[in-house]
Image (cartoon, rainbow, N blue to C red):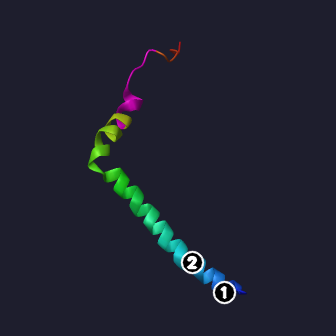
Amino acid sequence: MNLTYAEVSHFAQTWGLVFLVALFLGGVIYALWPSNRTRFDRASRLPLEDDDDTPKER
């Protein structure tokens, strides 16, 4: 079966779009899933926490 460039291009554009939309929706669902709320809240506060392991600037 010989495919032309146009056929391959059309397939890649159509199913590539479907794949990327599904990947995006999966990421949004993961980010908004209720059980991940505490993990993301903790991660959002990480830059503001003061830890004693880092060297202090003089």
Q: Is residue 4 above or below residue 17?
A: below
- The x and y percentages for residue 27 are 41, 56
Which residue sits at x=66%, y=86%?
A: 6
Which residue sits at x=45%, y=68%?
A: 21
Q: Earlier in the sequence, mark 2 or mark 1?
A: 1
13 left or right of 25 in image: right
Label 1 SS: helix
Instruction: Name the residue carrying label 2.
Output: 13
Q: Is residue 50 magenta?
A: yes
Instruction: Name the residue carrying label 1.
Output: 6
Q: Amino acid at mark 2?
A: Gln
Choose top left, top right, bottom left or bottom right for residue 45.
top left
| Distance in Å between CA atoms under marks 2 and 1 | 10 Å
Number of other residues with Cα within 10 Å of mark 2, as a class: few under 14, some 14 to 19, many 20 or more: few
Choose top left, top right, bottom left or bottom right for residue 10.
bottom right
Q: Is residue 13 above or below residue 30?
A: below
- The x and y percentages for residue 49 are 37, 25
Q: Is residue 35 above or below residue 21?
A: above
Q: Which region is colored magenta?
A: 44-52
- Outermost residue, right direction? 2
- Outermost residue, front direction? 1
Q: Is residue 16 above or below residue 46?
A: below
Q: Amino acid at mark 1?
A: Ala
Q: Nearer the viewer, residue 45 or 57?
A: 45
Choose top left, top right, bottom left or bottom right for residue 40.
top left
Which residue sits at x=37%, y=57%?
A: 28
- The x and y percentages for residue 8 are 65, 81
57 left or right of 39 in image: right
Quarter placement of the N terminus: bottom right
Label 2 SS: helix
Could you say which disc has been placed on residue 50 in the image? none
- The x and y percentages for residue 39 are 34, 38
